[in-house]
Image: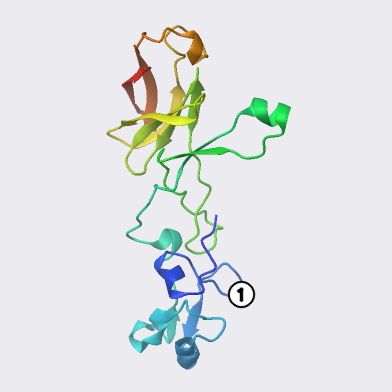
């Protein structure tokens, strides 16, 4: 759940943390070692660029990556390379399938906050709640916007996304297909059903019924 290993300025720009030898506290430079930091000597390498300037020292110490990981006050999430991973368990059992199919652009969730025992600026466990119903799987997403992302598990492709007004926490029910079948091929090709998915928003106090057309 960490975000560690910063060794270059690019790593720092990408929000990666630089830790000291304990692996729990952010790497600091003492003012007496400022020339070592400027030279990029170990253990500072290229991760302590901000400590090249004396004005960034407080009480003779400078933190190399104070806004890394979960400590970033203006955290931005990019979900284009994220999504939902699908696997056919029948293929796993019968044919030894070992890889999942990634459904891209199917949203993402924000990373979990750190625990009291976590390293500085690390992340906690991140969970993405989902529920299967018939051939569809519905999962919550916060990125790029609050939504329910619906994936067709037969085609393993994104079916649709339904934007929500609040932050969804879990999906508790996904209905079967229009005729009650779990197999899309058995349902009438011309039968479009409007069906509800129940998504819990926030702490679960407010529930909203969202309507989507399942083809």
Q: Where is residue 40 shown, x and y percent of the image?
A: 50, 85
Q: Residue, x 45% and y 79% (percent of image)? A: 48
Could you tell me which residue is drawn at 35 percent across and 34 percent down? Answer: 147
Point out residue 58 in the picture as x, y percentages from the top left corner: 38, 82
The structure residue drawn at horizontal position 50% and vertical position 90%, both measured from the top left corner, is 36
User: Compared with residue 165, is residue 41 higher up or lower down, i.e. above or below?
Assistant: below
The x and y percentages for residue 60 are 43, 87
Q: Nearer the viewer, residue 9 or 29?
A: 9
Quarter of image, res 179? top left
In the rendered view, tell whether residue 173 sits above or below residue 76.
above
The quadrant of the picture occupied by the N terminus is: bottom right
Question: Is residue 42 rendered to the left or right of residue 71?
Answer: right
> What is the secondary structure assignment of the residue under circle 1?
loop
Quadrant that contains the C terminus: top left
Q: Is residue 128 above or below residue 122?
A: above
How packed mark 1 is, by other alpha carbons closer than 10 Å (few <14, some 14-19, many 20 or more), is few
Q: Is residue 19 above or below residue 57?
A: above
Q: Which residue is mark 1?
A: 21
Query: Residue at 36% across / 15% down in the picture?
Result: 195
């Amino acid at each position: 759940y960490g975000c560690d290993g910063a060794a270059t300025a690019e790593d720092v720009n990408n929000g990666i943390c630089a830790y000291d030898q304990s692996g729990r506290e952010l790497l600091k430079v003492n003012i007496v070692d400022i020339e070592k930091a400027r030279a990029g000597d170990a253990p500072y390498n290229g991760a302590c660029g901000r400590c090249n300037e004396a004005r960034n020292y407080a009480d003779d110490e400078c933190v190399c990556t104070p806004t890394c990981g979960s400590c970033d006050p203006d955290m931005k999430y990019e979900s284009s390379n994220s999504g939902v991973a699908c696997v056919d368990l029948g293929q796993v059992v019968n044919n030894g399938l070992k890889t999942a199919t990634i459904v891209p652009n199917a949203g993402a969730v924000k990373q979990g906050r750190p625990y009291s025992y976590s390293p500085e600026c690390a992340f906690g466990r991140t969970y993405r709640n989902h529920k299967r119903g018939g051939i569809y799987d519905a999962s919550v997403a916060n990125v790029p916007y609050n939504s329910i992302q619906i994936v067709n598990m037969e085609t393993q492709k994104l079916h649709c996304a339904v934007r929500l007004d609040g932050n969804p926490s879990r999906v508790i029910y996904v209905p079967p297909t229009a005729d009650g079948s779990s197999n899309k091929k058995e349902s009438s090709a011309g039968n479009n059903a409007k069906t509800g998915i129940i998504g819990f928003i926030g702490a679960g106090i407010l529930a909203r019924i969202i309507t989507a057309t399942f083809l």
